[in-house]
Each structure stands twice: as structure tokens, then as C-alpha cells.
Image (cartoon, helix red, strand yellow):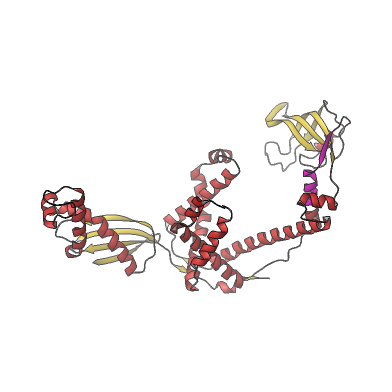
């Protein structure tokens, strides 16, 4: 077998393969057997007819055409191994010469992992910041919990600060109703400042059944540009007024909220603070990881990125987005309509980030091999066991997780995790 290799743009390689007629013999023999197995040949049992008989009945060209797939499959991977080529995806095969008693030749064009020259990343230095949780953050969490446990009592007296109202309202601009400017049974608490400045103050003194007209100016930086800085007229109908009674922040409150887990309010408050600290630490680690990888990638030299890798990463990102939108209970097509975008628009937008993600994968793979890292079968099984804790007694999920393709995916994920931790240990300082 003769092979020639030619580098093409975008990290592709063209492999020319020339197989002599003698080298084709084993493939021809096997294809003749397959033909005789599925075609009746008088005087012979299926698969037992001699090669010459099959050739006489069907022609050598038919045998050759039957043998092509096997010959390509075997010799293509032999050629890759010969040059230690890491191919990506399926090759594009062009048949060059097919004729009995002659060499069989074909060309395969395939994408390969691009080259990478890693810069002196050990000189990069990032630092963790000390996490400090302001008292206001803890108090806000407690305040939100109290609101969720608040007791609402309908009242006949006029609305005042901290009362909750249910209102209908309409908004007019130059006496014309604005789009989406009408709301029914809208809940609002005076003092929370969740509407434009001045709106809640206008509700003070209202009683159930009363109607009030007033005018307010929208803020100059209002998110709806057509309303920003404009003076609008409002008509509000008060349906009901409720007084809000918040639970006291004492030990009984802590016991009730935690189901008895905390004996005192002080314990509960301390736990909230610790949870906020852990959340902030997690956010900081994520930010530092991204900053670290971006910094390393900037000092690396990459060969041309294969189109197939970037394309696959874009589609992976789209799939992740679709799942996220679906989990929130929305249809993806409706989500796109709300953005006034198409799939093609998103693909174009995702391309720069997809390229960065591809580079990150190439970088991690290179360091994984350079440092002779390994992911053991025990580590993979441990990860599967952790996942299965979320799916107890579900044999179908267990079967999917035990599939070799999923194990390969997990091995790659765990390998990348090891690389990230290795980089962080050097780059990120306390």
C-alpha cells in the first residue's frame, strides 16, 4: 500500500491511498463470500461457492465494488496510524481508480486536531480575594423569608406604607393607551419601590373600590426607550388593601423555617451567612477559572481551527440554550421570536465563543497528555455512582450511564477537570 499526505487549509489533510491488486485479494475473497451468501448459486450452499464461480456468475467488477468499503475502512485507519494522525469526524472519500486487475486508489480528506504551541503559562498569576458578606445581604435574605411567611389581612382603612394592594391600572401617552400598559389584579406593596419613582406614593390613602388618576415622568434611563423621559398619565383602580404582619425574628421563627434544624435564630442567621460565603466563593472560582483559561489561551499559538469542531461546538451551545429555555417552561421558537432572532442569527453570535471553547478543549487535551494524566475506571465508576444517587432504582438510567460512549464522555470530562485543577494550583494564589 502506498500513501501520500498533503496538508490542506483549516487543519485538514488529504490522504492518497494506492492499494495493489495483490493487496486487494483478501478483501475480494471476503466480498465474494458475502455475495454467495445472499445470492443463490446452483450446486453450492450459501457462502460456499468458489471465488472463480462467483466471478463467472456476477463479474469481477461486482466483487470489487463489494470489497471497496472494507478496503477503505482497513487502509484508511492504517494510514492514520502510520503518521499518528488524530482525525476528527468522518472523512470525505473520493474514489480515484476502480478497475479489475489494477491498483485501487482513493483520496480521503479529513479534519485533524490543529497544532498548539503552549506559552509560558506558569508566569501567569491570579489572586483570590477575601470574601466578606455585608450584614445587609444576610438581612435581606431574612427579610425575604419573613415576607414569604407574612400574614395578609384585608382592611377597609386607607392604604399606608408597607400595605399591599391589588390594583388594575392603565398607562396613557398623549391620551393613547401604550402597548402592554394595562394590568389587572396587579399586586404591589407600598415602599418596595418596584415601579417607577412616585408611583407607589400615589397609592397611599387609597381604599378598596377607589379610582385615582395622576401623571408621572418615566426615568430618562427607562428600559423601554419609547417611554424613557416621557410624561405619562395613569389610571389606577384599587381592588383591595391588605395589612401585612411579618413574623418576629426569634428562635421559634428559626425552628419553624428550618423544620427544627436550627434551635436558635442566631444559628439560622449564621448559616445564612455561611451559605452566602460559599456562594460567593463558588462565583469567584468560576470567574478565576474563566480568566485563567482566557489568559493562557492568549499566549498560545493555535493552528487553523477545523470548521467541523467549531460547527459542533456551536450546535452544542444551541442545545444547552434550548435545554435551559425548556427547563424554564418556554418553547424555544417562542424564545427566539421574543429576541427577534433566528437559529442562524444565534449561530453567528455563538461563533466567537465556540472558537474559544474549542481552543480550551485543545489546550486541556495537550496538557493532559503532556503531564501524562490518567482517569481510572474506578474514578469513572465513582462518578456514575454519584449521578445515580439522583435516579434511585432506575435501571434504564443506569444502563445509559454504563454505556461505553457515556463512559468515554465522563472520562473526558474528568480529564478536563484534572487539567483545570492542575492549572489552578499553579496560577491562582490565595
**Was residue 145 drawn as part of the magenta stretch in this picture?**
yes
Residue at coordinates 83% horizontally, 41% vertically from top-left? Answer: 191
Instruction: Residue 411: tell me if it is visible.
Output: yes
The quadrant of the picture occupied by the N terminus is: bottom left
Quarter holding residue 104: bottom left
Residue 376, horizontal then vertical, whole percent: 49, 68
Q: Which residues are magenta?
A: 140-155
Image side of residue 368 versus residue 248, left or right: left
Percent x, y for residue 59? 13, 51
Which residue is outermost to the right? Answer: 157
Residue at the spot x=84%, y=35% of the render? 153
Q: Residue 147: x, y in percent?
A: 79, 44
Place of residue 85 in the rendered image (x, y in percent of width and height, measured from the top left): 37, 66
Residue located at (73% from left, 26% from top): 175
Please report the residue visible at 79 percent of the width from the left and 59 percent of the height from the top.
270
| Residue 208 versus residue 309 in the image, above or below | above
Does residue 133 appear to the left or right of 5 in the view shown?
A: right
Can you say whether 250 is above or below 123 in the image?
A: above
Which of the 4 quarters of the picture holds residue 222? top right
Amino acid at each position: 500500500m502506498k500513501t501520500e499526505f498533503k496538508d490542506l487549509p483549516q487543519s485538514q489533510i488529504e490522504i492518497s491511498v494506492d492499494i495493489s491488486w495483490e493487496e486487494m485479494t483478501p478483501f475480494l475473497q471476503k466480498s465474494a463470500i458475502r455475495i454467495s451468501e445472499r445470492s443463490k448459486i446452483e450446486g453450492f450452499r450459501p457462502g460456499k461457492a468458489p471465488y472463480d464461480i462467483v466471478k463467472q456468475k456476477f463479474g469481477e467488477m461486482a466483487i470489487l465494488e463489494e470489497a471497496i468499503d472494507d478496503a477503505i475502512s482497513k487502509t484508511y485507519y492504517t494510514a492514520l496510524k502510520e503518521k499518528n494522525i488524530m482525525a476528527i469526524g468522518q472523512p470525505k472519500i473520493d474514489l480515484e481508480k476502480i478497475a479489475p486487475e489494477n491498483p485501487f486508489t482513493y483520496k480521503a480528506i479529513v479534519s485533524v486536531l490543529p497544532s498548539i504551541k503552549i506559552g509560558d503559562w506558569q508566569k501567569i498569576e491570579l489572586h483570590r480575594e477575601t470574601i466578606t458578606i455585608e450584614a445587609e445581604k444576610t438581612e435581606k435574605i431574612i427579610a425575604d423569608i419573613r415576607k414569604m411567611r407574612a400574614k395578609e389581612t384585608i382592611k377597609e382603612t386607607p392604604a399606608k406604607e408597607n400595605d399591599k394592594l391589588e390594583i388594575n391600572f392603565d398607562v396613557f401617552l398623549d391620551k393613547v393607551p401604550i402597548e402592554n400598559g394595562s394590568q389587572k389584579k396587579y399586586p404591589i406593596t407600598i415602599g418596595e419601590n418596584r415601579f417607577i419613582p412616585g408611583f407607589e406614593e400615589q397609592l397611599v390613602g387609597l381604599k378598596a373600590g377607589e379610582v385615582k388618576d395622576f401623571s408621572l415622568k418615566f426615568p430618562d434611563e427607562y428600559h423601554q426607550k419609547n417611554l424613557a423621559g416621557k410624561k405619562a398619565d395613569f389610571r389606577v383602580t384599587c381592588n383591595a388593601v391588605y395589612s401585612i404582619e411579618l413574623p418576629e425574628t426569634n428562635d421559634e421563627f428559626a425552628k419553624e423555617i428550618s423544620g427544627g434544624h436550627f434551635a436558635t435564630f442566631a444559628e439560622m442567621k449564621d448559616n445564612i451567612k455561611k451559605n452566602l460565603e460559599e456562594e460567593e466563593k463558588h462565583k469567584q472560582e468560576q470567574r478565576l477559572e474563566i480568566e485563567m483559561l482566557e489568559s493562557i489561551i492568549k499566549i498560545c499559538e493555535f493552528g487553523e481551527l477545523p470548521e467541523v469542531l467549531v460547527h459542533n461546538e456551536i450546535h452544542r451551545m444551541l442545545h444547552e440554550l434550548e435545554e435551559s429555555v425548556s427547563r424554564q417552561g418556554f418553547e424555544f421558537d417562542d424564545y427566539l421570536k421574543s429576541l427577534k432572532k433566528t437559529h442562524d442569527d444565534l449561530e453567528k453570535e455563538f461563533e466567537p465563543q465556540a472558537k474559544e471553547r474549542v481552543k480550551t478543549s485543545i489546550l486541556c487535551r495537550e496538557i493532559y497528555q503532556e503531564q501524562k494524566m490518567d482517569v481510572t475506571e474506578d474514578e469513572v465508576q465513582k462518578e456514575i455512582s454519584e449521578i445515580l444517587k439522583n435516579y434511585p432504582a432506575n435501571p434504564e438510567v443506569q444502563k445509559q450511564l454504563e454505556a461505553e460512549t457515556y463512559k468515554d464522555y465522563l472520562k473526558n470530562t474528568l480529564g478536563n477537570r484534572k487539567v483545570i485543577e492542575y492549572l489552578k494550583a499553579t496560577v491562582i494564589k490565595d
